[in-house]
Amino acid sequence: MRFLCLPGAYGSADKFQVQLAPFVKELFEDGTATFHFIHGPCKATPPEGFEEYFGQAPHYRFIEPDNDVETTQQDDILSRIREFPDCETPEDTMRELMREGIATTHRSTDNALKYLLKIMQEQGPFDGIIGYSEGATVAATLLLHEQRRFKRKGIKPMFKYAIFFAGWPPVDPDRHNIILSDESEEMIEIPTCHIIGSLDPYVHGSLALYNVCNPDDAYIFDHAKGHTLPRDKETVKELGDVVRQAIRTYGIH
């Protein structure tokens, strides 16, 4: 099985490969999977105070406020998560976070999808997709795009399985609003695995993403930590077994 791997905001292909190394080793050494790492097309600068957290430049993102409109820092959703709300439901939390509107990212979102489709055409095929944080949101958005494209044009989706680490719900590929389960009946149809941390301050984002996936084929794995990638040997082995079981269950090759 071959995975396309998308890092979080301000990450890079090289950094994500290091972050995900224990998981990659677990599935690569027994021949279960191979991994292809990329990063977003937008060069980016981390928010003030987070320079050391994201490591040395260069930094990349998949989606950012469009550069041809007048924006402020508050237009960027990532600038608002420092005071992440905690409402009764994951969907209410996301609405509260978005109550001032989503950043003006229409062109950036479209460009990210075109960028990924080009990679799929030139460097694919891929059987599965892995996304962390912003990368998970973009991966989910791409999966919805594939589903809609299949219905409109009959182009068969490439991805058969998705793994989301600490993700947020997808953006509507056409209307550019965030998709929430209590506002839309549309869902990601392929099998998905959702790796969440119960101590993650943004865990409602992960749950909102889970809620827009097919409940019959969506699996939650809680590593009981924060907004991080699991790295300890026991947890990684358990997660590897979950993925191997999914591959057997769904006949993914």
Image: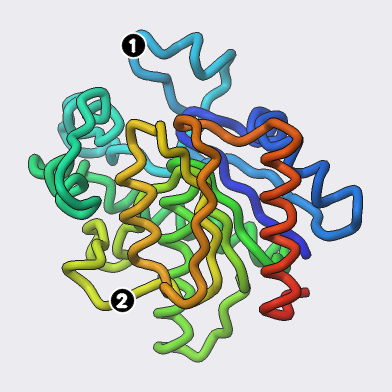
User: Which numbered dot is residue 64?
Assistant: none
Q: Residue at x 51, y 19 (%)?
A: 54
Return the residue at label 2.
186
Horizontal placement of 28 versus 71: left or right?
A: right
Percent x, y of residue 55 = 56, 15
Graded by Cα atoms within 10 Å as few (under 14), some (14 to 19) or many (20 or more), the crowding at tag 2 reads: some
Query: Which one is nearer the viewer's eye here, 70 or 161?
Result: 161
Image: 29 above or below 124: above
Percent x, y of residue 91 = 20, 54
Q: Residue at x 34, y 63 (%)?
A: 211
Work out which residue is located at the far right of the displayed protein and give it. 30
Query: Which one is nearer the viewer's eye here, 120 or 192?
Result: 192
Percent x, y of residue 63 = 39, 43
Amino acid type, mark 1: Glu
Amino acid type, mark 2: Glu
Q: Secondary structure at mark 2?
A: loop
Image: 72 above or below 238: above
Horizontal placement of 201 versus 42: left or right?
A: left
Image: 67 above or below 45: below
Q: CA distance from mark 2 to mark 1?
A: 37 Å
Graded by Cα atoms within 10 Å as few (under 14), some (14 to 19) or many (20 or more), the crowding at tag 1 reads: few
Percent x, y of residue 124 = 72, 64
Horizontal placement of 204 versus 116: left or right?
A: left
Whether residue 37 is visible here, answered yes or no, is yes
Query: Splitting the image into 4 quarters, where does residue 81 fall?
Result: top left
Q: Quadrant of the N terminus?
A: bottom right
Return the residue at label 1.
48
